[in-house]
Image: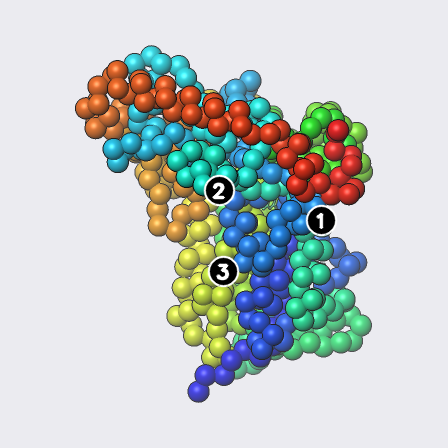
Amino acid sequence: MITPISKILIVGGGTAGWMAAAALSKLLGPQGPKIQLVESEQIGTVGVGEATIPQISLFNRMLGLDEDDFLKRTQGTFKLGIRFENWRRNNHRYFHPFGSYGSDMDGVMFHHFWLHARQRGHSTDLSSYCLQAVAADENRFLRPVANARNSPLGHIAYAFHFDAGLYAAFLRDYSEARGVERIEGRVCDHTLDPQTGHVTRISLEDGQSLDADLFIDCSGFRGLLIEQALETGYEDWSHYLPCNSALAVPAEHTGDPVPYTRSIAGRAGWQWRIPLQHRMGNGHVYCTGFTSDDAAHDDLISSLSGTPLRDPIQLRFVTGRRRKAWNRNVVALGLASGFLEPLESTSIHLIQSGIARLMTLFPHQGFDPAEIEEYNRLTEIEYAYIRDFLVLHYRQTERDDTDFWRHCQSLPVSDHLQRKIDLYAGNGRVSRERDELFNETSWLAVMHGQGIEPRGHHPLVTALGEAEVDARLHQILGVVRESANHMPTHSDFIRKNCASETGANMPA
Ligand code: FAD
């Protein structure tokens, strides 16, 4: 007989814990299992994680959140992509946009037409054919325009920057309103079933003890249940991605918030700039094998344009993933399940996709091993594909000005990544694996941005004739330009639609 799960305990109340609580309370409904969440204010959260990718809109929509309300409450801004500075070489920059370049023609991807022109000496950059890239460069933003299906204005893909602490608080209100019970306390012990090895209960320092059928471990890097209780093991990927530390510090704004994340490569890592309504989020991801904490601190502080609002917080991490994100009756989400540095803002998305997978394979009390195995198989693939995309940024660089960058040029490349590079370097082919997070536009943006020059292009392009290819490119360029002219500035759009009351710090 199938016995449904009747009690779920979420351990941890950071972004992962409250995203899980919100989603489970919404999707399992009032007749579903009892959901409790335990967190410790004394321990706190990592307090970073402010840039996202467009898929987060699906999560917010599934919860039924009003987007303007969400942005007001989280001091949010819009994000059209990421600007990578000094990654290929110093003083070079490129944009990784959400949304596509030009439009595909006669069944052939747009960039082949552009490659054809480029290989004949044309110099217009790929970015000029992408509305998001042009708009970002000019500080413009607009949501997709309804009834504009034939215009790039109808397909503007975007994500958000937001204050992670405020997002968790927002989701906490949402979850508690749907019956999730929050328990304040510090978990200090656990009990395992001697037969099954399942976690049966956890104990808090104040003497409380909490049991559940299903535990969601959102306890952050420490992995209280998945690692400390179940000793699941961790696959260390530092050899692929050597950065192991970060400093994060908010600062005052010195200009209008831009509609993109900045990623600025430095001597032994990179820095982020994430503009919110009320402040700028800044951070430095670096590798202690190639720089000291003090030097990284100085690099960060000396490059801030606004006054820091507090001292930087320091974080250490080991890039990699938990060997099993789901082990017995424990599912790990967020930092408890693994960590890939925030270069492409993927961690919050990994929480979201973990929740989606859990819902697809939601267990009953029997915990079918085949379902757990499937969850872990899909999670592993997702992590590995994202890892490869991140490696591309480091490995495919012309920089050799420091030991760190010389080291990056010899980073190992998986077969999957090598196949992608070879396909693009040949005739500009870009492919996407099934279940792969990053699409063809993303791979193209970074492979082009990091300097891979294809030797050829799709042969069908030639059949059109040079004059026709040039005419079509010219026309697309004009459409993108005209579309961008219709977009207001990012600040004006926020002021009109979703300015928070305390976001008054936003430059007028
Ligand atoms: P945490 O925030 O660490 O929360 C852990 C929770 O567990 C807390 O509530 C804590 O109190 C509780 N807890 C722990 N131990 C106990 C205990 N013994 N008893 C009771 N409670 C306990 N992601 C993005 O998507 N975009 C980004 O731009 C981005 N930038 C990042 C930059 C850096 C430097 C880092 C390190 C991460 C970044 N991330 C980013 C990742 C993002 O921060 C995390 O994915 C997200 O915050 C989720 O964290 P978490 O909830 O798993 O863990």
Q: Secondary structure at mark 1?
A: helix
**Given contact means CB atoms under 8 Å apart, are the residues at marks 2 and 1 in contact?**
no
Does 496 sit left or right of 196 as displayed?
right
**Position above or below: 73 against 209:** above
Q: Residue 73 shows which numbered tag?
A: 1
Looking at the image, tell me whether mark 2 or mark 1 is earlier in sequence order: 1
- Can you identify the residue that label 2 sits on? 146
- Residue visible at 40% across and 64% down in the picture: 374
Location of residue 42 in the rendering, given as x and y in whole percent from the top left corner: 79, 58
Q: Quadrant of the N terminus?
A: bottom left
What residue is disc 3 on?
356
What residue is drawn where x is 40% and y is 47%? 436
Disc 1 marks a residue whose amino acid type is Arg
Q: Looking at the picture, which amino acid does disc 3 mark?
A: Ala
Residue drawn where x is 49% and y is 66% of the image? 359
Q: Is residue 71 left or right of residue 356?
A: right
Q: Position of residue 203 (x, y in %)?
A: 71, 73
* Nearer the camera: disc 3 or disc 1: 1
Query: What SS does tag 2 mark?
Result: loop
Q: Position of residue 15 (x, y in %)?
A: 64, 54
Q: CA distance from mark 2 to mark 1?
A: 26 Å
Q: Tag 1 or tag 3, which sits nearer the N-term?
A: 1
Residue 99 position (above or below residue 63)? above
Disc 2 residue type (three-letter): Ala
- Label 2 vs label 3: CA separation? 28 Å
* Residue placed most toward the observer, 130 or 410: 130
